Amino acid sequence: MVEFDSMALQPSSPVVQPSVVPRHVAIIMDGNGRWAAQRGLPRTEGHRRGADAVQRAVEACGEMGVDFLTLYAFSSENWKRPPAEVEALMFLLDRFLRNKLDEMLKKNVRFQAIGRLTDLPTSCQESLHRAIERTAGNTGLTLILALSYGGREEIVDGVKSVVRDVQDGRLDPATITPDVFSQHLYTRHWPDPDLLIRTSGELRLSNFLLWQLSYAEFWVTPKLWPDFNKSDLEEACAAFAQRERRFGGV
Ligand code: IPE
Ligand code: IPE
Ligand code: MG
């Protein structure tokens, strides 16, 4: 189980808590294309191997006692890629959701998803909804897939939702606070990520969870996503445990 001492997160408690496991880990899974290029393989082979790394990350998070894992699997901007690559990514997503469902059920993993999911091909939407429904009763790791996801799009959708509630008389604009606005985001059911991991060495957010990462700790590795394994996750969590989270305090 999670050894999570909420006191360690208070501004008044700068003491390092080596046993702190991040409750919510978010990962920008980057570098599949470069992994393939380094081996003279097509980019799609990198994505195929990337799906194996997803499986490893899910298992490792479950074993370490992480409660929530959000994986950036396909961004709003990734639709700009060549149609054949987009098609391959959608095929791999569909196959992952179908093939891994039994294993996820056994491992007590609960599937969730964020993003403009209706953009996805119908078969992917069906596999996704099936995975979400079948695992809804699971109580272990919650695996949140960010699909056709963009942070700015999410904020715009949140603003539209707020406006609708105001127009319908359900919300008084004077009562809108950051906490209230958070309740209009795709992520309203879960706490914000504590730890953000990005592979392939890039130092940018690429439109990922712009609102929710306000106070996340960042950990970047030069490793490419298909090579990511449990020891990398452990290293990231160990680094996280050493961080002094101040939340603007002293
Ligand atoms: C991440 O790997 C997978 C997705 C963005 C879907 P990339 O495909 O971005 O790989 P690189 O960054 O080109 O190496
Ligand atoms: C971010 O990776 C998106 C995902 C990992 C799904 P990209 O490869 O699309 O990001 P940029 O283009 O390098 O910023
Ligand atoms: Mg990339």
Image (cartoon, helix red, strand yellow):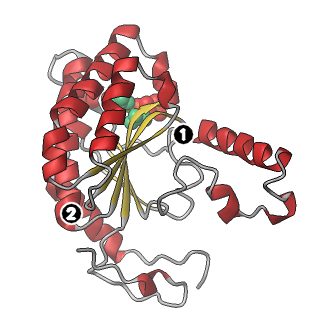
Question: Looking at the image, which residue is at 35% across and 24% down?
Answer: 124
Give the x, y percent position of residue 70.
Answer: 38, 49
Q: Which mark is residue 17?
A: none
Amino acid type, mark 2:
Glu
Amino acid type, mark 1:
Asn
Dot 1, how many residues are within 10 Å of its Cα: few (below 14), some (14-19), or many (20+)? Answer: some
Question: Looking at the image, which residue is at 29% across and 64% down?
Answer: 66
Rendered position, 160 above or below 12: above
Q: Using the image as rendered, state which of residue 154 and residue 112 is in the foreground.
A: 112
> Is residue 200 shown to the viewer in this render?
no
Question: Looking at the image, which residue is at 77% across and 48% down?
Answer: 165
Ranked by sequence position, the earlier of labels 1 and 2 is 1
Instruction: State yes or no: Cβ of the residue under disc 1 lies below 8 Å from any atom of ligand 2.
Output: yes
Q: Using the image as rendered, state which of residue 137 and residue 186 is in the foreground.
A: 137
Rendered position, 235 above or below 163: below
Identify the residue position indicated by label 1 in the image: 207
Secondary structure beneath dot 1 equals loop
Secondary structure beneath dot 2 equals helix
Give the x, y percent position of residue 131.
Answer: 29, 38
Give the x, y percent position of residue 14.
Answer: 46, 87
> Is residue 240 shown to the viewer in this render?
yes
